[in-house]
Image: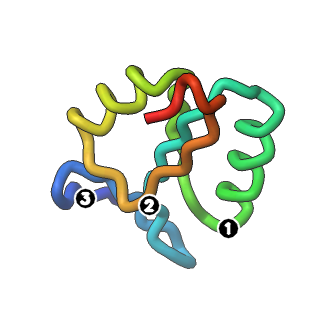
Amino acid sequence: MSSSVERGAIYIISKTRVMAKILLVGSDPSITDMYVKVLETNGFDSIIENTAKDGLDRLSDEFFPAVIVFLPREESL
């Protein structure tokens, strides 16, 4: 298995496909777990942040091809 870096994102090359990292930002563990299972089943790696601030901090440090946000309205980005 090899890996490469492109614009800050790490892609893992598997025998079948390239796995992109997806950022999940959400405070509900049941929803987070559901998204992780769906993403992993479809070949994606996921990084989880629990607050809007932590999500924005992670985005300033790394590139993600997609971000999924599920936060209460008062806490959203």
Q: Amino acid at mark 3?
A: Ser
Label for residue 19? none
Task: Give the residue at mark 1.
Answer: 42
Q: Earlier in the sequence, mark 3 or mark 1?
A: 3
Q: Amino acid at mark 1?
A: Asn
Query: What SS does tag 1 mark?
Result: loop
Graded by Cα atoms within 10 Å as few (under 14), some (14 to 19) or many (20 or more), the crowding at tag 2 reads some
Q: Quadrant of the C terminus?
A: top left
Is residue 30 visible in the rendered image? The answer is yes
Q: Residue furthest front?
A: 74
Query: What SS does tag 2 mark?
Result: loop
Query: What SS does tag 3 mark?
Result: strand
Label for residue 4? 3
Q: Residue furthest left?
A: 7
Residue 66 position, x and y percent, is 43, 58
Residue 53 position, x and y percent, is 39, 21
Q: Is residue 41 left or right of residue 14?
A: right
Q: Nearer the viewer, mark 3 or mark 2?
A: 2
Look at 67% across and 55% down and name the residue there: 40
For marks 3 and 2, give the CA distance: 11 Å
Residue 14 position, x and y percent, is 50, 67
* Residues tagged 3 and 2 counted as in contact (Cβ below 8 A): no
For marks 2 and 1, give the CA distance: 11 Å
Q: Is residue 44 left or right of residue 53?
A: right
Task: Give the residue at mark 2.
Answer: 20
Instruction: Give the vertical position of 40 relative to 50 (above or below).
Output: below
Q: Amino acid at mark 2?
A: Ala
Q: Earlier in the sequence, mark 3 or mark 2?
A: 3
Q: Quadrant of the N terminus?
A: bottom left
